[in-house]
Amino acid sequence: METSTEAIIDRIESSYAGLVRLYRSVPVTKVEEAALPNGWSVKDTLAHIAAWEWRCVSLLDASHHTDAPFEAQPDVDAMNHQFYEERKEWGWEEVENDFREAHQALHEAIRRLPAQRLKDSFIQESIAGETWEHYAEHLPELQEWHKRVASNR
């Protein structure tokens, strides 16, 4: 993988932009409907992604000299549930702002990471897993949702 800061951010940004294009092209009322197979709305999914990005920011900031923060194996299901419960009552504007702020904070955390740490394959794999690979997990259901919404116009 390309190890420059900007190359990694560009890879993240390219995947992120695909998510943004999907939700920005439909009415907010559709974004807020619980219409995904897991019972979530697109709003819930974006809040979930933002929560994981905030977690990644914290881990990157704590990993300037060690891999230890990334080595901990969280209970993903429990964290997903916690993130959902914390954010389920948030309005669309709050979720969208958090989604954008988390993404910007992620860029900044990557830029703050020492160059040698950024070149570390473990750090790179961790960033990939928390960003474009995570986005890709949700992309098919969001694309299917978008196709349904767009065809009902």
Image (cartoon, rainbow, N blue to C red):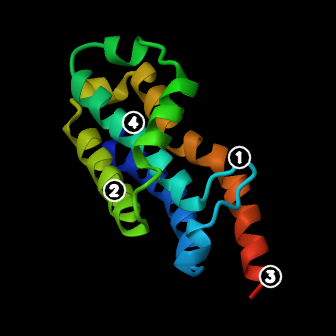
Q: Can residue 48 be seen in this view?
A: yes
Taking depth in this image into account, of 122 and 149 the one nearest to the observer is 149
Camera-side mark, 4 or 2: 2
Q: How many labels does the image show?
A: 4
For label 3, the SS is helix
- Whichever of callouts 4 and 3 sits on the residue coming sooner in the sequence is 4
Q: Tell me which residue sits at (62%, 74%) in the image.
A: 30
Camera-side mark, 3 or 1: 1
Amino acid at the residue labelled 4: Thr
For label 2, the SS is helix
Q: Residues within 10 Å of mark 1 (few under 14, many from 20)?
A: few
Q: Residue at label 3? A: 151
Q: How crowded is mark 4: few (under 14 residues within 10 Å), some or many (20 or more)?
A: some
Q: Identify the residue at the far bottom of this view.
A: 153
Q: Residue at label 2? A: 98
Picture coordinates of residue 140, whole percent (x, y) = 73, 54
Q: Residues within 10 Å of mark 2 (few under 14, many from 20)?
A: some
Q: How far apart are marks 4 and 1 (CA)?
A: 36 Å
Mark number displayed over residue 38: 1
Picture coordinates of residue 142, whole percent (x, y) = 67, 59
Q: Can residue 1 be seen in this view?
A: no
Taking depth in this image into account, of 128 and 120 the one nearest to the observer is 128
- Whichever of callouts 2 and 3 sits on the residue coming sooner in the sequence is 2
Q: How crowded is mark 3: few (under 14 residues within 10 Å), some or many (20 or more)?
A: few
Left or right: 114, with 83 as reference point: left
Q: Distance between the residues labelled 4 and 2?
A: 27 Å
- Whichever of callouts 3 and 1 sits on the residue coming sooner in the sequence is 1
Left or right: 88, with 106 as reference point: right
